[in-house]
Image (cartoon, rainbow, N blue to C red):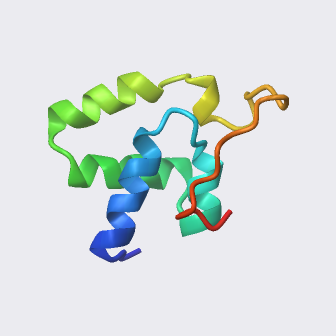
Amino acid sequence: MKFSLEDTDRIIMMAWEDRTPFEAIQAQFGLSEAEVKTLMRQVQNKKTYIRWRERVEGRITKLGKLRDQAVTRHKSKNQKF
């Protein structure tokens, strides 16, 4: 998929946010978790990508199915879902 620079920046911001699950990125942009990882690898330098992967690896808040359903998240005015 080809995204505009603005959309790519928003995807990267959402991927770095602790409380935004991959499911929200998929709902808004149609990218699976694996596709987000591929995009992050392509647009970031190697050290930044590795740091991001270490940060999100197994993070419950990034995986909606593991998140406690009592946790609600702030919805940005820029988010559609």
Residue, x 65% and y 62% (percent of image)? 27
Give the tally of numbered discs. Answer: 0
Q: Quadrant of the C terminus?
A: bottom right
Q: Quadrant of residue 55?
A: top left
Query: Is 5 in front, or is 1?
Result: 5
Q: Is residue 64 above or below residue 58?
A: below
Residue, x 52% and y 64% (percent of image)? 78
Pinpoint residue 59: horizontal percent, then vertical percent: 56, 24
Residue, x 41% and y 74% (percent of image)? 1
Side of 47 relative to 19 (left or right): left
Residue furthest to the front in view is 77
Pinpoint residue 80: horizontal percent, then vertical percent: 63, 68
Residue, x 42% and y 57% (percent of image)? 11
Q: Is residue 16 above or below residue 55?
A: below
Pinpoint residue 14: horizontal percent, then vertical percent: 46, 49
Pinpoint residue 47: horizontal percent, then vertical percent: 17, 30
Side of 54 relative to 61 (left or right): left
Q: Is residue 25 above or below residue 53?
A: below
Side of 68 relative to 81 (left or right): right
